[in-house]
Image (tube, rainbow, N blue to C red):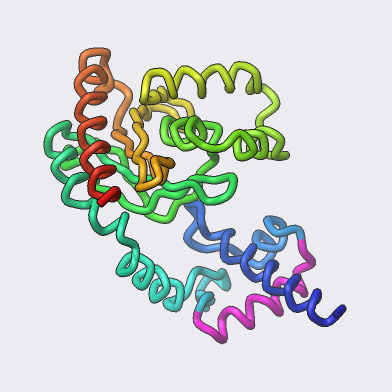
Amino acid sequence: MDQEKGTVRAVERALDILLCFSGTEMELGLSEIAKKVGLHKSTVHRLLASLESKGFIRRNPQTDKYRLGWSVLELVSNVYQSDDLASIVVPQMTQLRDEVGETISLYIRVGKERIRTQAVESNQPVRRVANIGQRLPLYVGASGKVLLAWSDPDVVEAVMNDPAWPEELSKRGFLEILAKTRDNGFAISIEEREPGAAAVAVPIFGRDKQIVAALSISGPVDRFTQDAVQRFIPAARQTAQIISKMLAR
């Protein structure tokens, strides 16, 4: 029994190490990884060696830092080949991108985070760069608010009670925002997560009328004028409705 618990704990720690690379850092040193996961460097070094032997981590001999290995790409490729949602939305997202001229992203909720699973970037010189696979908090950003607004109350409660919840963010005020998002059918964010960026997001529903994803239009804040937002919202809604109907078949 103790051996089984130890094995599960080792797997959880290895996964935590892999998730260290879900942000913007391409390479991380041993000390950086150990700090992120809260483990001794000797323990992290052993786990990195195991991950490296399976191709999930590779070490840069020039910097002595680690980065994700090719085995991760093999898994990601398999996910996208089998992910009906991510594959069927690309034509609709591309059409929306061409209509509004901004970056279009698809987000899903995984636990207490949201992940960008698909993106079609704007063709404009100054545009929002969308990294597929990026994990982001649910409590900031238009897509996060949309994903939570139509989630079960226990999901919302878990997010608000998470240690990562920012102290300056009023929980009561946030619940009011979620209620307003449901009433309006969309959410808007202006420089909530990063300076100079804005977004509009709408829900996508599945066969059971439960939310399955959030569709967003994002770009530089100076292009998200009041007139532009009023144009973006119906365009995003129409695309989301088309995708929802496709999923309901």
Is residue 40 a member of the stretch shown in magenta? yes
The stretch in magenta equals: 39-55
Q: Position of residue 74 (x, y in %)?
A: 39, 76
Q: Is residue 108 above or below residue 180?
A: below
Q: Residue 94, position in %: x, y? A: 17, 46
The image shows residue 152, relative to residue 223, as above or below, that is: below
**Magenta region, mostly helix, strand or loop?**
helix
| Location of residue 115 with respect to 100 vertically, above or below | below
Q: Which quadrant would residue 95 be assigned to in this image?
A: top left
Nearer to the camera, 121 or 185: 185
Q: Where does the image place residue 16, in percent across and percent down from the top left?
A: 64, 63
Give the percent coordinates (x, y) of residue 25. Answer: 50, 55
Residue 46 is left or right of residue 239, and the answer is right
Outermost residue, right side: 2
Which residue is rendered at x = 50% and y = 81% of the image? 55
Q: Quadrant of the N terminus?
A: bottom right
Which of these two is toward me, 69 or 105?
Answer: 105
Counting the numbered discs, the total is: 0
* Magenta stretch: includes residue 118: no
Q: Is residue 40 above or below residue 132?
A: below
